Amino acid sequence: MTSIETVTLTAGDPDPAVAMDRGITLTPAAERIAHAADRTLLIVDRGSLVARCSCWWKTTPDVNGRPAGAIGHYAAADAASSQLLLQRACETLAAEGARTAVGPMDGTTWRRYRFIVDRGSEPPFFLEPDNPDDWPAHWMAAGFATLATYTSALNENLAARDPRTAAALDTLRDRGISIRTLDPARVQSELQSIFALSLSAFSRNFLYTPIGEDEFLAQYRAVMPYVNPALVLLAEKGDSLVGFMFALPDLLEQRRTGSVETIILKTIAVDPAYAGIGLGGVLMDLVQQKAHENGFRRAVHALIHETNVSGRLSSRSARTFRRYALFAKPL
């Protein structure tokens, strides 16, 4: 073990000079800074990087009433280096007062988190987190167990219509709610409204913590060049946004095949004050109708927590094809 060392970085530290010849690269310093990692750990074997992660404990939520710390930016070349890395990460979090370690999660659920644990036969889709198939086993060998599960589902018949939509639309009209598409001439203000609604709509989600507006807008601006405004629906009551569905084409399919037939239903949100009146189901059905009208053949319902309302909506038209897990370990 004398050939192995642990290198510790804080967010503002420059990247060390290590070889990256074992298939593991450094998390970019700009990303460590933007994500405000409280500490980054590197496992270096004879001058080569073999594993890395970052730890957060200052802004993480409690889990079952216990202060939690997050482990993210994870990568490991093999099981042995992973065990040492995760041991060091758990020691770090425990020393800072965390009583549960959660991961993989890059500090917050607004960023990359979860592992694929059941890949299925479908190829990866655009913006989906991916990982080598042995990484979940690394975490379980280190004493982690499943904390939460998620799915992605596939609708292969966009021509089908939900028979509940017509009656639900009548209800929405009676409540003074109208639905329109994204206005490309007002992208900044549209995204700011989406941000404000997201904070309230997701506030009861598992492991929720708020995100800053600048980071949120940067995430969405990065994908706006690929978005068809007709496939982003906004539900409004007067001047207030009360629901939205954000969808975009599967660019990975386009890169693989030269064409794109799959739309990704990335995010759906409804103001809690308007829950239970069918708005979420209407938004999902209308986006799939519009996708079909625009030449798409399939829709991915992406990354759904298995207890969320969106999972029940998805089950109306789609079948699960991929499963994910988030892990935790008591400290």
Image (cartoon, rainbow, N blue to C red):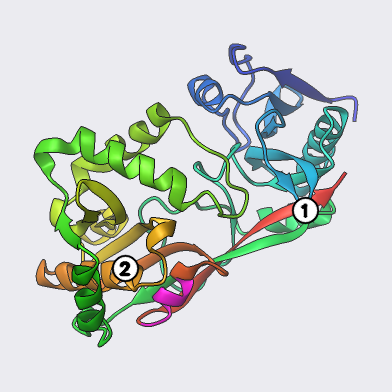
| In the image, residue 152 above or below residue 21 | below
Report the magenta residues as a range: 311-316
| Residue at left offset 43%, top offset 80% | 315
Query: Neighbour class for label 1 at 10 Å: few (<14), some, many (≥20)?
Result: few
Q: Which residue is mark 1?
A: 64
Q: Mark yes or no: residue 296 visible.
A: no
Q: Magenta part mainly helix, strand or loop?
A: helix
Q: Quadrant of residue 22?
A: top right
Q: Is residue 16 left or right of residue 167?
A: right
Please state which amino acid type lies under the numbered disc 1: Asn
Give x and y (percent) for residue 119. 53, 68
Picture residue at 78% right of the left edge, 35% below the top:
89
Say which of 278 and 194 sits in front: 278
Q: Are marks 1 and 2 in contact (CB under 8 Å)?
A: no
State whether residue 120 is above or below residue 59: below
The residue drawn where x is 85% and y is 54% is: 143
Mark 1 residue element:
loop
Magenta segment includes 182: no
Q: Quadrant of residue 81?
A: top right
Task: Give the alpha-carbon distance from disc 1 to disc 2, as whole Å.
Answer: 31 Å
Q: Is residue 53 above or below residue 143?
A: above
Mark 2 residue element: helix
Amino acid type at mark 2: Leu
Mark nearer the N terminus (1 vs 2): 1
Placement of the N terminus among the 4 image quadrants? top right
Q: Which residue is mark 2?
A: 279
